[in-house]
Structure formats: structure tokens, C-alpha cells
Image (tube, coloured by chain):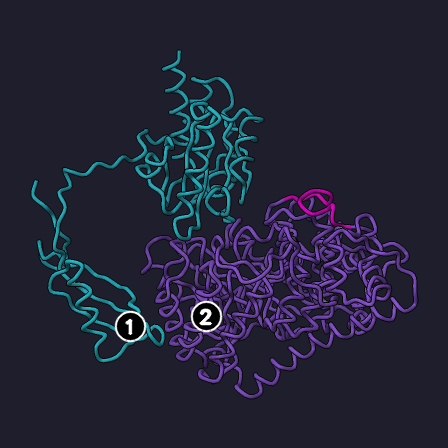
Chain colours: A purple, B cyan
Amino acid sequence: MRLELDRGLTEEAFALAGDIASPVVEFARVHTTVAIERTVARLFGVDGVDELGVPLPNVLVDALGPRLAEGVALPLAQACVDSGRSPQQVAEAVATGEPLGKPGSPEARELAFQLAAEGDRRIARQRGERDAMVAAHGDPPTPWVYVIVATGDIHEDARQAQAAARAGADVIAVIRSTAQSLLDYVPYGETTEGFGGTYATQANFRLVRAALDEVVPEVGRYVRLTNYASGLCMPEIAACGALERLDMMLNDSMYGILFRDINPQRTFCDQYVSRMINGRAGVIINTGEDNYLTTAPGHEAGHTVVASNFINRALALAAGIPERQIGLGHAFEIDPDRPGQLMEEWGIALLIRELFPDCPIKYMPPTKHVTGDIFRTQSLGTMFNLVGVATGQHIQLLSILTEAVHTPFLADRLLAIQDARRVFDAARPLRESLQAVPGGPLDRRAAAVLEQTVGLLREVAGVGMFEAIERGWFADTPRRRDGGRGLEGVAKRSPGYHNPFLELWEPQLAGWSAVGADG
Amino acid sequence: MAELVPYGDTFGDGMVQLSFTLPVPADARAREIGLQFLRNNGFREPQVVHATAADRDMTFYVAYARASAGVDPAQVTATDVEAPALGFAEVNTLIEGQLGRRVVVIGAAIESDAHTVGIDAIMNMKGFAGDYGLERYPWIEAVNLGAQVPCERLLREAQERHADAILVSQVVTQKQVHTRQLTKLVDLLEAEGLRDRYVLVCGGPRLSNTFAKELGYDAGFGPGATPSRVAAWIAQELVKRVRTEG
């Protein structure tokens, strides 16, 4: 199904989004954070915990103290040169109280570069492995069937992930324990307890990836694994995911600020580096615009979703993520009892699809207006699936009949997958069969949302992102630039700041001043 | 009154509809295993109408059966929140006239719960289902702390802001964690000798007034509760308390 859009307006929107993104990226390029430096340590091969259970990347960066502004790479490399030990051995020594040395030697700089090149090779190897598996086993048709597992126990998650893949899922997301976004460290090892989900750890990533790889030949298609590069450890989790071949990451530019009260400066720095890693790793990021609709009425807030899509895309391009890896989000959250609801959903889904034709759009199911009436939820899910396939969405997070009741039972997921497969197979040709009646209700609805979107983007571009967030223009939630969690972990880079990964990657990014309609 | 049984298509037939998953392969024996499972649980004349593989060693069933026991409604007590429904204007008038000061209501989704949907629906300006939220009430000072608020912080804020009522939301649960978290708040209040200082209310899709009272709350609101119902109950409870004390 197609829409005729006002090309003047769409081009203005792309240009405005580029203008909005530029100062944010400039800010990120002159600051660093504790999470970014811990990421450097991780990609240098530092892992594990000290006697008290503190992750060694935290131990190292805490030892830097006020020297955070210089970055961890050179002090760590210098300690390796001076002692002849590996980064891991140095981290273990620092954990027992040994201080980090003063960097300065050219050998340290050379070693830091070599360690970064090795980290980059590890990421590239996993990316190559994914490409090879996709080539060997094939990719499913779109919309991809995306389901969640959320048991709290990684072994149970792995078992349910395999079951879901056999039942027909194309993408499995292991839902994270709800408290994790506010932890300023990445937990270590395989975990068996969590609330509403399971901790994102590198070991947990490895375990579920291996479980899915096991069923890939059996189901005859590559099955993708998703987690969350969000919260206070955005870039670290991106690094863990890149090393363990996660395929998708929830990685929004503003979610943590608005919905978790994480400091805006911290978030914008962390998202820049996390996205660079995701881009490098071939990971498809999923942005979180569905959340705007849980705090505001769906039929009124459509333009905030689309405006955020433009901004998220511009920031992702600036961090080197190509369009095919930018999974912009939205959701089916208009009150189902509102007359014309299905038309309005159809209109906005189609608008987003047409605006970003090269992005794998991620479509989220109804959650806000569902109740314990599981039969009603099941039928809403069917309508959601119909809109998803008829408008050509790429990634469909399935509606589960027990949404709002409990985390999904094994059979709940099966019912959802069967429904989606049935609707997708039945209705896929509709995508190429329908045209919105020019001037009809759906066409007018889409045009109105686009117009409101451009209006909001103009206002945001006028005051800048930080100010727009302070004024509560996104999700009706004002957040001060010096408020929220994690600001103490941000430092302005000193003239001697060194991050060999950025030196390696930034020159390869597409010229970010060219962020625009043709990206 | 005699015992009642479920109604399928004939009065007294006792028909119930079930769906469940058993960890057995969906082979020739699966149907018989499902029937036996239902008999073992006291269901009579079970019929398995659908049995399919939910995984290699898992079978999902849809079944019908007759219940073996009924219920005497006269023997069951359940309390809904007892207070007449009042509208937006009536609640404000009641507070203004009877208390003569703004009522402070502090709300949060506590502990592990990251879902603000419930607390926002009741507290935010916009409200829910066309019913304004507590922030819109001129005679209520509504403080919404958001999600993942530790019980300790909620109590500290309640003391600092001289709250009259504490409103706790629990939306998403897993392995009954919502019960443990709701109980933790009551335990803390009691340990600090503060339980009687506040009107204590909880809400969420798995809560009822009866269950809330069992946990030690003054009231509980289940699915579909509107801000005005919550506001009306809190206002009337505070007025009642003032009269009792006075």
C-alpha cells in the first residue's frame, strides 16, 4: 500500500533532523564517560570481577579517578608496557591495590592501537560469522516475527528461546531485569535471578546465542537475538553484544533520559559510542518510540513518534550506522474503542514505512489498552498483525494474549506466532495491492501527522535538543541537562584524551555533516 | 442457598473451558495423558478438543470438562472499596469544605516495577478513560515519583512532603514478586511506627480490595479503576478519620 507524501515537507524534516543532531554529536565528541572508558577496557579484553564482585572494567575506571578526562586506554597500555602484562592481568593487579601508571611512552600508544585493532577484529569476526550463517541458512520474509522471553533464569530463557524459534520466531529478545538500566556496571556471569527479566551479561549473551545457533540448521533460517544497549551502560552492553554476536539492540537516543531519568549529557555521549559499536558489529538497533504512546493518548501523540524517528535516524547515521541497521520504532497503541482506530493505526504505520523506506521498521503491539480479557487481546493482536504485513513493517514484536497479565507462558507465545504466521501469509500481497484514496480519511490522517511532525521538528531545531528536553517537549517529561542519574560519570575530554577505537572508527563514518535526506 | 456450578449451554451442566501445557511430546499418547490429567484434578467427563506441539517435548491443550465442585455464593465475602462514587467537582468540594486544606497524595511504582502506566493513569494531568488525573484536582497536591522507587525512598518522600496518602502501583509481576514488594512497604511502615499516619492504597491489574486488605493496605484498586474513584475514596477516608479523631 502506498501514500503520496508532500516531498517538500519530508525534505525539510530530514534537514531539520540533521540540524538537531549536529550539536548533540559535537557535544559527544568532546566528552567521555565512565561507561565509554569501561567499554575501552572491555574491548581491550578486560573481563571478570574482583573479590567483592565488582567488574574489573569498573575497578580500572574507578582507579582513574579525576584522570577520567584522559581516558583509560593510555594508562592501561602504559601499565602493560611497563610490566609486560596483559590488560586483564593489569586489571587484576589494580584490583589488589596497585596504582595505574602515568602514560607517556610511544610504546604505550602503539600498544593501545594494536589492542584496539584486535578488539575491532573480534567484532568483525562475529559480524562475518553472522553473514556466513545468513548466507548458509537464509533470512525469513518480512515482517520478522519477534517474541520475548522473560523468565529471569538464563537457562530457562535459552530453553524458551529454542522453543520459540522452533515454533516460528525469527527474532528472540531476552527481556532484561527491570532494575538493570540504573546499574552503573554490567553484572558478570550466567544469572538465574531477575525481576521481570534476566540480567544482560556477556555470559548470558553467549549462552542464548549458542542455544539459538543450535536450532538454526533445524529451522532452516537464521534466528536473531536481541537485548538492550540502554541505561547507564549503553556502550558496554553494545560491546558485550558485539563480541557475542547479538543481532539487534534496543538503543534509543532519548529513552533513558525520558523514562529512566538518566542524565541527558551522559546519555548522548553513551549513545554515540554505543551506536558506533552497533554499526560496526552489523547490529540492527531498535529505537523506542513506542514508549511515547504509553504516556500520551496514541491518537494525539503520533507526531512525537515520527519526529523522534527523524532524530533517532539522524543521530544513528552520525554514529556510522547505515540505514539498513536503523530499526525505527512505533506502536499500535491507539485506544481500540475509538471509532476509526484501525484506519488511524494503518495511516501512521504506512506513513512511517514510506518516510524511511530503507530502515527496518520495528512495530510494537498494543499494551496500554489491553486488559485481562485475553480473548480481546488476541483479536487486537490479529488486527495489529494485519496492519503490520499490509503496510510492510520489517520487525513485528508480537502481541501476546496474556499481555498485562504475566510474562508469557510457553503456549502464549505459540498462539501469538501461529496467529502472526497465518495473517502474514494470508495478507502479504496486500502491501503491493492497495493505494490510499487521495484525499480520503487515511491519506488526510497521514498528511496531518507529517505536518505536525515537521512543526515539532522546527521548534526543536529552534531551541536545540537539550533545551527541548528541559521544556518537556518529548513524552511530556521535562529533564534538566544537569539533572538525573549518572552526570558524575561525564568528563570533558582533556587535550591528551586518547581513545584508539574512536581514532580507528571515526574517520570511517560517513561525513556526518552530510546527514540528510539521502543519508 | 444451593451450590452453583458453571453454565455452559444448560443450567447446571458445570462446563469449564481450560487451556494448559504439559511437558510431554505431542504424540499418540498426548491426548490420553491430557484427559487423565484432568480426571486427576477432579474434572468429570473431560474432552480434549485440541492438542498440539508447543515444542519438542511440550503439548498445548484446549479442553472442556464438567466441574466436580460448585460454590455457594452466600458463603463468600468480598469487599469492594466502600465509598460512594464522587465526581471531580464533588471531591474538590468535599476536601475544601471538610478538611479545608490541600490533600497530599504521593504515588510510585515501587521496587523492581519499571511500569508507570498504572500510576500515570491515576496521577497524571490527563488521567485515564476521559477521567482527569489527581494532578488536575485543585485540592489535591499529587506527587508522582515514577517507577522503580525503592520503598525506603517512598517513605522518606512521604515524610518530607507531609503526605496524607500513599499510592502504590504494581503492574508487572513475575513469580509473585508484586506481593513481596507490597508487603515490604507495609513492614517498613510498621517497623517505623508510621503505618497509621498514612492512608495506604495500592493498585494494579492483579490487585483487588480484598487482597489489598489482606496485605495490610487500607484499600486496593483493580483493573479499570479511574482517578476519580481513587480520589473519592481517599477524600472520604480522610474526612472519616478526621471525624473519628475529632
Residue A489 in picture, x, y percent from top left:
74, 49
Q: Which mark, by number, is residue A161?
A: 2
Question: Which of the chains bears the disc numbered 2?
Answer: A
Q: Nearer the viewer, mark 1 or mark 2?
A: 1
Give the residue furthest to the bottom: A136
Residue B12 in picture, x, y percent from top left:
8, 54
Q: Residue at x 60, y 80 (%)?
A: A130
| Secondary structure of the residue carrying numbered label 2 | helix
Q: Which quarter of the figure is the C terminus of chain A placed in?
A: bottom right
Question: Which of the chains bears the disc numbered 1?
Answer: B
| Secondary structure of the residue carrying numbered label 1 | loop
Q: Which residue is the site of mark 1?
A: B24
The answer to whether A271 appears left or right of A215 in the picture is right
Neighbour tally class for label 2: few under 14, some 14-19, many 20 plus, Cα within 10 Å: many
Instruction: Indicate the quadrant where residue B217 lies.
Output: top left
- Amino acid type at circle 2 is Ala
Which portion, as a residue range, is magenta? A478-490
Residue A348 in picture, x, y percent from top left:
53, 64
The residue lying toward the viewer, choosing from B181 and A25, is B181
The residue lying toward the viewer, choosing from A144 and A79, is A79
